[in-house]
């Protein structure tokens, strides 16, 4: 199996499919939290007929190395952006490329990479994505504990009642982290402080986040039944990203690329074909 070594010395699994494609626009696939490149198997089956497709398992996911020690506050976002850039250099990809990102992590990395390297990006496709940074284990557990109506209006609700939400969710966050916390030299106060710091930073980053600098053509696909990244997030992204197209799929949840693969694949292929 192919691996490349990132700057921290970890081996990351990748797939470079159809590298000899005559098409000049490779397509990069970015999976979500607790997922892997395998999630895109239905999209790869279609895209590989025409395009070079590159996918990789992020650190701690799939077939890539899993760190023995987990730093609770470690930010996946910056490391993933760095690893993606290093993989593209490792594979010698110099042409403009498109990125397809799923969920809040894959879609979030896609958005930030496009803003950081606009000269390299031909298009973005954001699947069940949003503008909330679920980029470490604490934030992921906190967000998963929130009911649907809060996710629909995340900033309005959370920003005004974050202390109450933390009082209710921190015990559950600690329970979910119980295996990870074994061996960590943290007092209860230190642990509480670290969790609170991550949530407050998360809210601040959302307030400051502005994807209007994304200039490439962007397709946003949401699911009508998505409880994790509600369709309202896709609608807001559409309003924030200037050159974007919005598609909301009926009878599709957060895993629309697998649940409604025919519809999603058709939307993806039609969007790419129309690009000049």
Image (spheres, rainbow, N blue to C red):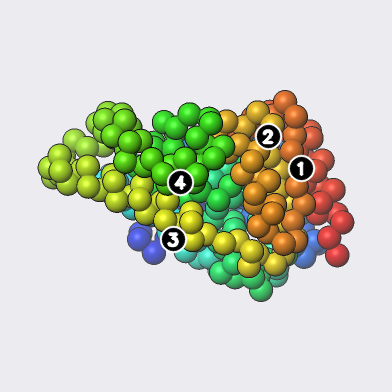
Q: Secondary structure at mark 2?
A: strand
**Left or right for 177, reference 209:** left
Dots 4, 1 in contact, CB < 8 A:
no
Q: Earlier in the sequence, mark 1 or mark 3?
A: 3
Q: Secondary structure at mark 3?
A: helix
Q: Secondary structure at mark 4?
A: loop
Q: CA distance from mark 1 to mark 2?
A: 9 Å
Q: How many marks?
A: 4
* Residue at the spot of label 4: 134
* Residue at the spot of label 1: 247
With respect to residue 47, does 171 lie above or below?
Answer: above
Q: Earlier in the sequence, mark 4 or mark 2?
A: 4
Q: Position of residue 153 (x, y in %)?
A: 54, 40
* Labels 1, 3: front one: 1
Residue at 39% over, 64% down = 7
- Residue furthest toward the bottom? 119
Dots 1, 3 in contact, CB < 8 A:
no
């Amino acid at each position: 199996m192919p691996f490349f070594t990132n700057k921290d010395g970890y081996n990351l699994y990748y797939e470079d499919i159809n590298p000899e494609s005559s098409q000049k626009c490779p397509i990069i696939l970015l999976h979500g939290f607790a997922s892997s490149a395998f999630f895109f198997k239905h999209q790869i089956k279609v895209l590989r007929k025409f395009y070079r497709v590159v996918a990789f398992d992020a650190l701690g996911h799939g077939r890539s190395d899993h760190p023995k020690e987990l730093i609770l506050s470690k930010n996946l976002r910056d490391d993933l952006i760095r690893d993606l850039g290093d993989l593209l250099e490792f594979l010698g990809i110099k042409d403009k490329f498109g990125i397809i990102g799923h969920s809040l992590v894959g879609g979030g990395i896609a958005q930030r990479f496009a803003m950081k390297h606009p000269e390299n990006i031909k298009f973005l496709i954001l699947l069940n994505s949003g503008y909330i940074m679920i980029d470490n284990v604490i934030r992921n557990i906190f967000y998963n504990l929130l009911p649907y109506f809060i996710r629909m209006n995340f900033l309005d609700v959370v920003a005004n009642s974050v202390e109450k939400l933390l009082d209710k969710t921190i015990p559950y966050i600690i329970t979910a982290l119980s295996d990870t916390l074994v061996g960590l030299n943290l007092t209860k106060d230190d642990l509480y402080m670290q969790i609170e710091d991550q949530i407050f930073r998360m809210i601040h980053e959302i307030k400051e986040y502005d994807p209007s600098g994304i200039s490439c053509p962007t397709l946003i696909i949401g699911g009508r039944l998505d409880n994790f990244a509600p369709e309202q997030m896709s609608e807001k992204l559409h309003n924030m990203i200037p050159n974007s197209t919005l598609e909301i799929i009926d009878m599709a949840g957060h895993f629309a690329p697998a649940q409604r693969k025919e519809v999603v694949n058709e939307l993806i292929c039609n969007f790419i074909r129309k690009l000049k």
